[in-house]
Image (spheres, grey):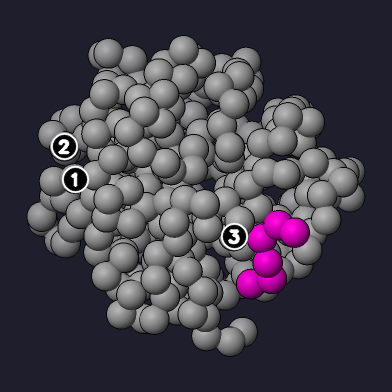
Amino acid sequence: MSWSTDPVVITVAPTGAEVSRDQTPYLPIAPEEIADEVVRSVTEGAAVVHIHARRDDGRPTTEPDVLLRIRDLIRERVDVVINMSTGAEVGMSHYERIRVLDAEPEIASLNLGSMNFGDLVFDNHPDLIRALATRMRDEGIRPELEAYDVGMVSAAERLLSEGLLVEPLLYNFVMGVPGGIPATAENLLAMLANRPQPGPWTATGIARHELPLGTMATVLGGHVRVGFEDNIYLRRGELAQSNADLVARARRISEELGRRVATPDEARQILGVRPNVPTASPSTIGGPS
Ligand code: KMH
Ligand code: ZN
């Protein structure tokens, strides 16, 4: 693996499903608040937004109307690649998770396996994974493969062999979830080594792992996700007052390491966002990494 000078795609995950206002008063919940945070984050260098919607009372929802309102409020003000979560909240029904695709995101998360998620069980039945992958393939939505452990990385091979995924695969390694793989340097290398083939990838370190894992991904040619979904602190004991503060730090680090940040259009090219149909030539989307 050679050192990279290619642009870094910064994804901001501003809200998530598990974080609450009790944990941080800065959490954006209403569509307008999420859009404000996305605009600030794009100004600081984010090219992709990973969206989870909330109801007025703060509870997670996958109501397409709410997702579309968030998307439209963002689109009115800024260009950014729209990634929506089909992981949603632990315990949501298959129906609630699949209908996220009705909101026509450019990218949607595709969680590759079931696991303990803290004290809860994150259920990703193979039937659900296939149903989501089939719709994404047929509708040209780029799946971002969420892998929380090494076995989930290689689980994509089966979907590939069934024609449900298009190469090169786009991975997001989510590391440091209690119940998933610990966020260590050795484990990031193991995740990379277990991919069926090279392709674009992002690292998401949970809580205090966000900064070192993102830095390691930047060094290794990967891309970086930050935001309150994963981490609410700027440093120990100091809450970040905006997702944009986390984005700005990721940008400073990547620039110091010789990698400028990607624009949204560059991110579409790098991540292989559309065309994403089975006939697409692998050479036209993404690139070895
Ligand atoms: N809320 C987590 C259980 C995704 O966006 O697809 C799952 C999650 C992953 O956030
Ligand atoms: Zn998510």
The type of residue carrying mark 2 is: Tyr
Q: Nearer the viewer, mark 1 or mark 3?
A: 3
Under circle 3, the secondary element is helix
Give the x, y percent position of residue 261: 40, 65
Give the x, y percent position of residue 237: 10, 56
The residue that label 1 is drawn on is: 242
Q: Residue at x 47, y 69 (%)?
A: 7
Q: Is residue 270 above or below residue 104?
A: below
Under circle 2, the secondary element is loop
The residue that label 3 is drawn on is: 270
Q: Nearer the viewer, mark 2 or mark 3?
A: 3
Seen as rendered, the residue at the extreme left is: 238
Marks 1 and 3, Cα distance to the nearest angstrom?
27 Å
Mark 3 C-beta to ligand 1 under 8 Å: no
The type of residue carrying mark 3 is: Ile
Badge 1 density bin: few <14, some 14–19, many ≥20, Cα 10 Å = many
Q: Residue at x 78, y 56 (%)?
A: 167
Mark 1 C-beta to ligand 2 under 8 Å: no
Q: Is residue 3 above or below residue 46?
A: below
Q: Is residue 117 visible?
A: no
Q: Residue at x 76, y 67 (%)?
A: 197
Q: Which residues are magenta?
A: 284-289
Marks 2 and 3, Cα distance to the nearest angstrom?
31 Å
The residue that label 2 is drawn on is: 26
Q: Residue at x 65, y 53 (%)?
A: 272
Q: Is residue 152 above or below residue 130?
A: below
The answer to whether residue 81 is left or right of residue 240 is right
Give the x, y percent position of residue 25: 13, 34
Give the x, y percent position of residue 121: 52, 34
**Residue 94 is inside the magenta segment:** no
